[in-house]
Image (cartoon, helix red, strand yellow):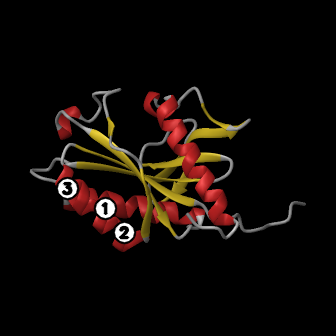
Amino acid sequence: MGKIGVPKPVKLIMSLITSDDLLLHQILEVLAQRYGDIDFKSDILPFDQTDYYTAEMGRGLFRRFVTFRPLIPRESLVRIKRETNQIEEAFAAEGRRRINIDPGYICAEHLILATTKGYTHRPYLGEGIYADLTLIYQKGEFRPLQWTYPDYASHQIREILKEIRKRYLQELKGGSR
């Protein structure tokens, strides 16, 4: 019989996609008030590998990854995804989102994103939220899986996530950045 234990806390990460610099700044303030200090911001990255959000959010989209301190329990991802959906709705205009907020977490083993869409590789977590196993960490690298979105499979994003993982491991040991 396996011994039941509590897993280590994880690093909350969010991908923010928008075309509005001012809105991004406002959202970052809201997120920091709710989830803690933002301790990492990626450079602004073009969001140009898909047109998935163009009809709803327009052209000229960009992305920024952010992480928060303190670490969180894994099971809080359901609540966080529901809350970020509410934030998206609160900042919508004429029924259209102006920002996409994708929360997830990084731990030593993988990157998990929260989603409202179920699929074969997305186990149900509860309250309408599924876990998307997006990348796994093996042999010193984040590795894409057959269902990983092309942008997350890119070298550039995997390097950003590798840096976040490194910071997470330092934070687990009690160090800070």
Q: Nearer the viewer, residue 125 or 7?
A: 7
175 shown above or below 65? below
Q: Quadrant of the C terminus?
A: bottom right
Mark 3 = which residue?
A: 23
The picture places residue 2, in percent across and down from the top left corner, at 86, 60
Residue annotated with mark 1: 28
Q: Depth check: 103 or 120 in front?
A: 103
Sequence-first tag of 3 and 1: 3
Badge number at residue 32? 2
Residue type, numbered disc 1: Leu
Q: Residue at position x 25%, y 54% from top?
A: 24
Q: CA distance from mark 1 to mark 2?
A: 6 Å
- Distance, label 2 to label 3, CA atoms, is 14 Å
Rendered-image quadrant of the N terminus: bottom right
State whether residue 69 is above or below residue 103: below
Specify whether 47 is left or right of 97: right
Cα–Cα span, label 3 and label 1: 9 Å
In the picture, residue 32 is in which quadrant? bottom left
